[in-house]
Image (cartoon, grey):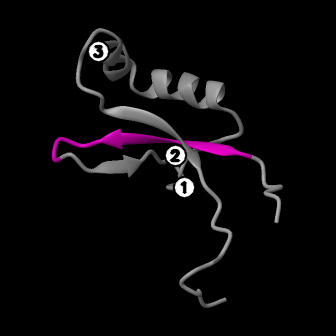
Amino acid sequence: MADTAPTRFKIEFQADNGIWSDVRGPDGAVLTFDDEATARAKLAELYPVEVQMERYGGRKRTRVIRILTDEDDWPERRR
């Protein structure tokens, strides 16, 4: 079965304890983007210091990741 869903991206931030969390908007929903460039621009807007530090050898604390679709729906979820 071919994947026809468009590729989406989201931003994650690593807390001091090492746990990655989704970046959420003011409404509490996970911020998602249609293309990676837009996601990276928003990342730089929200976390300018961290993004600059990463470019010059600082610890990686932010990332843009591709959202994968769940094709098999396992384990079966209630509808």
Q: Dividing the image into 4 quarters, which one contains the C terminus?
A: bottom right
Label 3's element? helix
- For marks 3 and 1 on the same chain, the one whose residue lies earlier in the sequence: 1
Label 2's element? loop
Label 1's element? loop
Q: Amino acid at mark 1?
A: Ala
Residue 44 falls left or right of residue 69: left
Quote the CA–CA distance across marks 3 and 2.
23 Å
* Looking at the image, residue 40 lies above or below residue 27: above
Residue 15 falls left or right of residue 62: left
Q: Quadrant of residue 59?
A: top left
Residue 25 image label: 2
Does 15 lie within the magenta span? yes
Q: Amino acid at mark 2?
A: Gly
Image depth: mark 3 or mark 2 in front: 3
Write the residue at 21% across / 46% down.
18
Quote the CA–CA distance across marks 2 and 1.
6 Å
* Looking at the image, residue 19 lies above or below residue 13: below
In the image, the segment drawn in magenta is 7-17
Q: Which residue is under mark 3?
A: 53
Q: Residue furthest front?
A: 1
Residue 29 image label: 1
Residue 17: x, y in percent? 16, 47
Does 78 lie within the magenta span? no
Q: Residues within 10 Å of mark 2 (few under 14, many from 20)?
A: few
Q: Amino acid at mark 3?
A: Met
Q: Dividing the image into 4 quarters, which one contains the N terminus?
A: bottom right
Q: How many marks?
A: 3
